[in-house]
Image (cartoon, grey):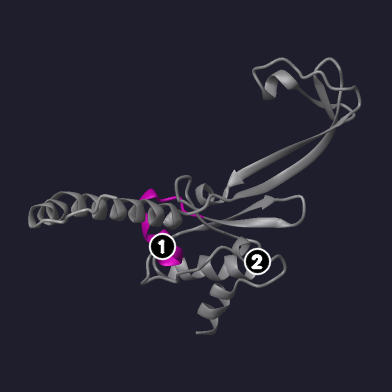
Amino acid sequence: MEILELTDRKVQHFARKVLPLCLTLCLLLLRFFFELRSKPKTSIMKLIKKTGIFNPDGEIVLHPGISISWELLRDKNAPELPPGIPIDIDISIDEQTLVSGEYGIVWASYDLRQAEVLHNALFAQNITSAIGRVELDEGFLLLIIIDNKKDIGEALDFIWRKATGLRLKPDWTYPVGEPNKSFEKWVDG
């Protein structure tokens, strides 16, 4: 059996060449891991869910007189499914896109009181906003909309983005039926 002889030269080579390379690789892997974990998870909010009946000609009948052609939904031919099979159609929106400010929407809530309080708080900050309403299958979603593009960033910072603002979390981050604890905490002072 051969015994590995460590000479000063081998130790120095290891310390200068191999060890820094291993440490660099470990640091890169850790950085990659933490970047993956810190990226916001994309959540999808379902706005509408409808069930239709599939017809062999590629038509999905949602209601008598209301149908959608498969070709309108996809560029491919209709699938070979048995006639009459139920097909669900969902219309959804990415929650992060919804409140990103890109379309003037800076906040969304299921709670009318929350929407009105935020609308008034923005007014106190000299930011004009409006409350929009989106009907969902169950209930509705209220949107805080900013028309003046120059005010969007300031509104986002105030409501949820900056540590110096309200730091609110969206209603949908809480279990269904529970109040928005971040909003309640801010209101209660």
Disc 2 residue type (three-letter): Asp
- Tell me if residue 30 comes above or below residue 124 in the rendering: above
Q: Neighbour class for label 1 at 10 Å: few (<14), some, many (≥20)? A: some
Q: Residue 27 or 74: which is nearer the viewer?
A: 27
Q: Considering the numbered disc 1 on the image, is that residue within a helix, a strand or a loop?
A: helix
In the image, which disc is placed on residue 161?
1
Please state which amino acid type lies under the numbered disc 1.
Arg
Name the one closer to the observer, 119 or 67.
67
Q: Which residues are magenta?
A: 145-160
Residue 8 horizontal/vertical position (percent): 8, 57
Q: Residues within 10 Å of mark 2 (few under 14, many from 20)?
A: some
Q: From the image, tell me which residue sits under label 2.
A: 111
Q: Is residue 4 above or below residue 174?
A: above
Q: Position of residue 59 (x, y in %)?
A: 81, 21
Helix, strand or loop at disc 2? loop
Main secondary structure along the magenta-highlighted residues: helix
Q: Identify the residue shown where x is 51% and y is 78%.
A: 186
Residue shown at 37% from the left, 66% from the top:
162
Please name which of the two marks, 2 or 1, marks the residue nearer to the observer. Answer: 1
Which label sits on residue 102?
A: none
Q: Position of residue 185 (x, y in %)?
A: 54, 80
Residue 57 position in % (x across, y down):
83, 15
